[in-house]
Amino acid sequence: MKKLIFILASLVLLFGACNIKPSAPSQEWCEWAFNQIPDHKDISEIDSTAFSTEFYGLLKEAYKAMDWETEMYPGMIGDYEFLFYWYDGNGDSILEPEDSELKYETGEVADGKTTVKVKVYAPSFAPYSPTDYEFDMALVYEDGLWRIDDWRNGTRDLTMKDQVKRYIEWYNSNKDTAKAAE
């Protein structure tokens, strides 16, 4: 009888542990993860553990495609250009002015996913540029850690993951065409 009670208690604990939801990422983690975004950076300059396995794999493939494209079309601004513009545009950074404020607002955690709203208030950019910027950093809880699984710039229709997938499709169709022409 004691064995049966022990087994039942163990099963209850095991099932209870399976239903534990991850807590929301900390502000410190959000800051670290934001600093891994390859805005105006090469993928070699970031920590791959900040990204989900799928998203980082897609980014690696996109950077490989970028290398191919720059070799095929030297001196041209290619279709890869979006890879460098996650939150900053071409020119001054919204984060450079001393009066810029950066905030992270974590949404509800559900099914091992959440979204962090990254908000930047940059009053020094007025009157010619907006002063408020908002981005969505989609996270997934993978291997016991939060990881970036996508990114949305509030001014773009497509998420970064969608743009990367389209670019990889373009690369795959064009590299085959280039090989056939050789």
Image (cartoon, rainbow, N blue to C red):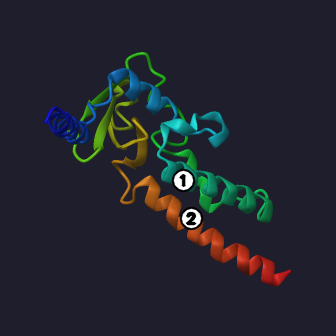
Q: Which residue lies furthest to the front in this view?
A: 1
Residue 133: which quarter of the image?
A: top left
Label 1 residue SS: helix
Amino acid type of the residue that numbered disc 2 sits on in the rendered structure: Tyr
> Image point 52% across, 45% down: which residue?
85
Q: Which residue lies furthest to the bottom in this view?
A: 180
Residue 13 to residue 160: above or below: above
Residue 112: which quarter of the image?
A: top left
Quarter of the rendering occupied by the C terminus? bottom right
> Image point 32% across, 30% down: which residue?
25
How far across and down, in percent of the image, does residue 87 sit?
45, 40
Q: In this view, does 41 lie to the left or right of 34?
A: right
Is residue 90 something one can see in this rendering? yes
> Cβ–Cβ below 8 Å for labels 1 and 2?
yes
> Image point 59% across, 71% down: which residue?
170
Q: State the mark number for residue 167.
A: 2
Q: Identify residue for label 1.
A: 82
Amino acid type of the residue that numbered disc 1 sits on in the rendered structure: Phe
Q: In this view, does 16 lie to the left or right of 128?
A: left
